[in-house]
Every structure is written in C-alpha cells, then in structure tokens.
Amino acid sequence: MNELAIKELLYTLADNQLILGHRNSEWTGIGPILEEDIAFSSMAQDKLGHSLAFYTLLHELGESDPDTLAFMRNAAQFHCCHLVELPIGEYDFSLIRHFLYDHAEAIRFEYLAQSSYEPAAKVAAKLRGELKYHLLHANTMVKQLGNATAESISRLQQSLNYAFPYALGMFQPSPYEADLASSNIFPRESNIQAQWLESIQKILAQTQLQQTAVHTISPVLGGRLGQHSEYLQPLLDEMAEVINIDPSTEW
Amino acid sequence: MYGGGSIFEPVKLDELAHEDPVKLAEFEARIQRGEKIEPDDWMPALYRKQVIRMIEQHAHSEIIGALPEGTWITRAPGFRRKMALLAKVQDEVGHAQLLYSAAETLGKTREQMTLDLISGKSKYSNVFNYPTFTWADSTVISWLIDAGAIVNQMANARGSYGPYCRALERICAEESFHLKYGHDAVVYLATGSSKQRQMIQEALNRWWPPIMTFFGPADKISAHTEILMRWKVKMATNDECRQQFLDMYVPKVWELTLTLPDPLLRKNEAGTWEYTEPDWEEFKQVINGKGTCNKERLAVRRMAEEKGAWVREALLKPEATYVKPLA
C-alpha cells in the first residue's frame, strides 16, 4: 500500500468537501427562499461531516487530529480545487457549482466504495446515500430553473459558462495516479471526468441550457498541488479566527 | 428560538361589537373546555388578527434570529461547534418555515408577511437588534435566549390555536437540543483559559440587559391583554415568564462562578426574584428601530429577498394558484 498516495487522495477528498461545505454554509439565513436556505445548510452539514470522516482516516494514518488539519493549515497545504474556493456569489452560481461538483462527487463515492483501501471504502459506502439527495436536489433545481423564466435560464447559463473551466479543474490527477489506479485504490481522474460529462449532460439536455464543447475549455488547475485562488486564504483565516484566539485550549 | 415577548397592541374591545354574540359565546366556551381552534372554525376577527400577529412575529424572530448567530458559523472553533451551530441555525430557519405556514392557515401569505417584515411594519424579538461581538456572544444567545424562548413556547404550546400549538411542540423538541449545545459551549468557555472566561463574562454583561427585556415589558406597564389570556392566545404574563426564567437559569450561571451585572438580583424569602427594572424606554426605542442593529438586520433580509426574487419567480409554475397550507 502506497501510504503517500493514499494520504494525498484523502486530503484532496477531505479538503474539497470542507471548503465547499463551508461555502454552502454561508447561505444559512440568507437563501433566496426558506426551503433553499434549509437545503444548502443541510448539504453543508453533510459535506462537513464527510470531510471530518476523511480527516479522521488521515489521523488514523498518523496525521494530526481533524480540527488541526481543518483549522490550522495554510492555503498552500490544501489540496482542494479552485471551484470550491470561489465565493458563493449569487444563487445561480452556487446552484451550478453544487450541480457540477456533486455529479462528480457521487461518481467518486461509488468508486471509493469499491476501493481496495478498505477504510475509505467503508466510509464511502456509509456516506454515499447522502450524495443521492444532493444530486436529487441539484437536478431538480437545475431542471426547474433551467426551463423557467428568461432571467433564470440566462443566469444559469452565465454561471455554467463561468464555472465550467473551474469544474474541469476538479479532475486534476494526483501525482500518484498511476499507483492509485494500478492498486485498485482509486481510478484515473480522466475516467471520472468522462462519466461526469455524461452524467451532467443527461440533466442539461432536459433544460434550455447549452454546454460548450469541453475540448475548447482549459481547466483551472493547481489546487491539488497547493496553488490556490485568492479566495482560499481569507476563507481559512475566517474559519480559524476564533480557534486562533487560543489554539492550545478546547472550545 | 426565538419567540418570546410578543408585542401585543392594545386590544380594542369595540372590535368585538360586530361579532355574533351566540357564536362568540360558543367560541369562548370551546376555549374554556380546552378545545383547539382550527383554521376553518368560526373565530372572531380580533382573534384571527392577534393570532396572525403573534405567529408572524415569532416567525420573523426565527429568521432574523438566524443572522446574529449565523455569522459565527464560518468562524466556529472546531468541527464539533461548526456542525452543531450550523445545524442549530438551520433549525431556526426551519422553525420560520413552519411558523409562516401556521400563520398562513389564517389567510395571510408568507410573501405579505415578508414584505411587512422588511418594510418595518411587523416586529420581531427585540434581542436580535443587539450585536454579537465575539464567539462568546453567540454561545450566550444559544444558551440563554433559547432558554427564554423555551419558557415562552412551552406556555404557548398549551394555547388555543391548533396549528400554532402543533408547530410549537415540534419546535420545542429541537430547542431543547439548542439549549444543551449552548450550555455546553458556555461551560467550555467558563471553565477554560482566563481569556475564554473573560470572553464569556463580557458577553454575559453585554447580553444580560437585553435578556431581561426578552419577555416584554413589566405587567404593570404592558398593554392590557386579559382577553388574549382568556382566549388562550397569551398563556402567561411577561413577568411570570421572566420569573420562571430567572428561577431556572440564574442559579446555573452562578454555578459557573460567572456574575450577572445587576447588584439587585436576588431571590427573596417569598421565592420571587428581585432585579433592577430593565430600561423600558430603551426597549421601546430599540423596538421602534433605534437599536444598534435594526437597520443592518432588515437590510440583510431585504438583500436576501431582492436577490432571491428571480428564484421565487422561476419556481412559480404558471398553473400554480395560492394554496392554504394544511394545518
């Protein structure tokens, strides 16, 4: 078992979920409609819970405890993609991000549940049921708003165009990808991307939204290797604001 | 959270003059027998108006109350607190949803209630016009404001309007978890480092005066509400709720060797709590828009409504017509 490869994979999974969970939680109290406010808070809780589960696996492999990993690292030590770092913007962007991200996440969890690395397989098998609801939510809202008013269609279209290069950045390969794939721990990102495209296209085809040809878009890469957007460090500073008052004590 | 200290306007009894005396007598007899009033039952217009006002204020308090605590979700120290606070504030938004539905059963739409909130016409609990300066302020709200709300809501859950009572039963069940979370977070600060103790003491000092006004003005100066009590709209007087709250929670604060900023606060031999009378003039000023955060709270709500307008419009199916929610 290649421990470095596994750790890198776990960090990537956990960091993406933590940062997106944090972003989604920013909708709590200001959603466009109470039901969506509640839905985003609920998904944020799930994402935070998922990240905690993967940080816990890292801790079992000798890394620091989950709170230290989540709250005390700086941006360069994070492995998340730029898509999850971006500010929540308006609801159309947050919805499209959630749609693009969770279609990929659901595929990841299905593979992970079959992983030869058993601890992750167990976690994924336990948590993947929650992803179904995230997908159901994203698909329902995208289908509804993507077919409703001229404004809703145009907003979703603009957000889709804006988010797409970032979404492709979700599939940046691990430096250990060959190892992970050959030892049946986790498949190649290109496989996941191909399935993801199919999966989102199925839904987009039921809307009035157009998707540009993927090969014309350059992905926004770097996150997995610690190169982040300008938005991550301020987010992390905010997250650690209270804990940093006294990191040596319990809160 | 967060109902409590509902502001009832003086009841004008001449509004009852148009009511059918036989129906009115039967209505009052039903309440007397402990029956619940349901949405399609006959009720005096004054009852409908006051119940809508009360549930609506409660709903607004939930949604506005989500703001002072909500700003701490992104800063909560550690996974345990972050997830618990997020779940708690989500519950509050869920309570607003339940309560708006309960009020809608009486004929006022959620949209109209929202408009009345952001125009400043409808009120919400006054305590949310005070700022949360530190993490410790948010823990004081989670513990003591939720505790106050439970005192109030447990009483109101025995009231006469069926849909409101049923909503309150569900709400109180969740509130009891909030109380545990809030108490736990306060205990960690009170028993933690000297810096943490200082934070929680300062937060208590800041929040005690607003907490003392949470149940509304003293009985001797509040609007006459006898008929609302007879109709089981209001179930306990403001002072009764305040006494019950003090009796349950002052000892718990003192147990943590924290102090409360009122030199007169004590339980006398008759078992009644004595305290410095809150500044009801300030209370009146704040509730009428002059508090530290009134403008900010309403501005955030207005921003959320305006930015969300296109979503709500797009979710309305053309064939949809207004449907009164099931009670």
Image (cartoon, coloured by chain):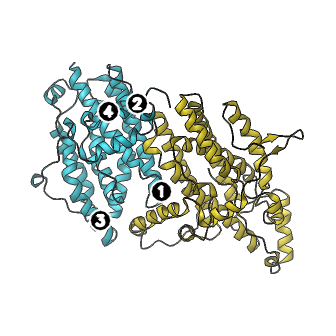
Chain colours: A cyan, B yellow
* Residue A190 placement: quadrant: top left
Tags 2 and 1 in contact by the CB under 8 Å rule? no
Q: Label 2 to label 3, Cα distance in Å?
A: 37 Å
User: What chain does badge 2 belong to?
Assistant: A
At numbered mark 3, what does the secondary structure look like: helix, strand or loop? Answer: helix
Q: Earlier in the sequence, mark 2 or mark 4?
A: 2
The residue lying toward the viewer, choosing from B190 and A40, is B190
> In this rendering, does residue A15 appear at all?
yes
Task: Give the left or right position of residue A52, taking residue A210 as reference.
Answer: right
Residue type marked 1: Glu
Tags 3 and 4 in contact by the CB under 8 Å rule? no
- Looking at this view, name the residue that lies furthest to the bottom: B18
* Residue A139 placement: quadrant: bottom left
Q: Closer to us: mark 4 or mark 1?
A: 4
Q: Closer to us: mark 1 or mark 3?
A: 3
The residue lying toward the viewer, choosing from A143 and A34, is A34
Q: Which residue is mark 3?
A: A155
Tags 2 and 3 in contact by the CB under 8 Å rule? no
At numbered mark 4, what does the secondary structure look like: helix, strand or loop? Answer: loop
Q: Which residue is mark 2?
A: A67
At numbered mark 1, what does the secondary structure look like: helix, strand or loop? Answer: helix
Residue type marked 4: Arg
* Residue A192 placement: quadrant: top left
Q: Which residue is mark 1?
A: A35
Q: Label 4 to label 1, Cα distance in Å?
A: 34 Å
